[in-house]
Amino acid sequence: MDSVLTYRQQLEDAARQELFRALEQKAGLRRQLRRVEDELTTLYRNLEQERKATTAQRLIMYERRIHIVRERLARLEEEMDRQQERVRQRRRHLLKASQERKVLEKLREQQNRNYRNHLNRKEAQMLDEIAVLFHER
């Protein structure tokens, strides 16, 4: 039983590590998203500042750059959605592994209690037999 419980603990630890990695990846994506959002905000601000005193060619360049950054932002948002789903899956997996380990721990505790009760009954029987043998003399 102990080896099975050790194996279940290892599975739970592995699930915890997977969740931690998924959360780290999500945090990395969140940082990327913030940087791209900041870049887009800066581009819009610069475009507004230059809109009055610049050439049409330069405005077109800004619009193209804004379009590229928007597309990158959309891809990152999609990746963030996928990563959030991975995190949810990893949490469910960890919860399941934890529950399975706890069930096995309770089963082991129950088996240990049952075995102690069995030994106590055996000991009581032996003591009763010894008492009867001494009483008959």
Image (cartoon, rainbow, N blue to C red):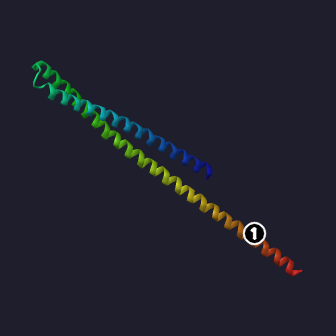
* Image location of residue 106, percent across then percent down: 56, 59
Q: Position of residue 5 (x, y in %)?
A: 58, 51
Count of residue discs: 1
Q: Residue at x 78, y 75 (%)?
A: 128
Quarter of the rendering containing residue 135: bottom right
Between 63 and 46, the residue placed more toward the observer is: 46
Q: Position of residue 61 (x, y in %)?
A: 16, 21
Q: Is residue 42 above or below residue 123?
A: above
Q: Looking at the image, is 107 positioned above or below residue 62?
A: below
Residue visible at 68% across and 67% down?
A: 118
**Residue 70, horizontal then vertical, whole percent:** 22, 31
Q: Nearer the viewer, residue 122 or 38?
A: 38
Q: Which residue is mark 1?
A: 123
Q: Nearer the viewer, residue 26 or 110?
A: 26
Q: Amino acid at mark 1?
A: Glu
Element marked by disc 1: helix
Q: From this view, report whether residue 122 is shown above or below residue 83.
A: below
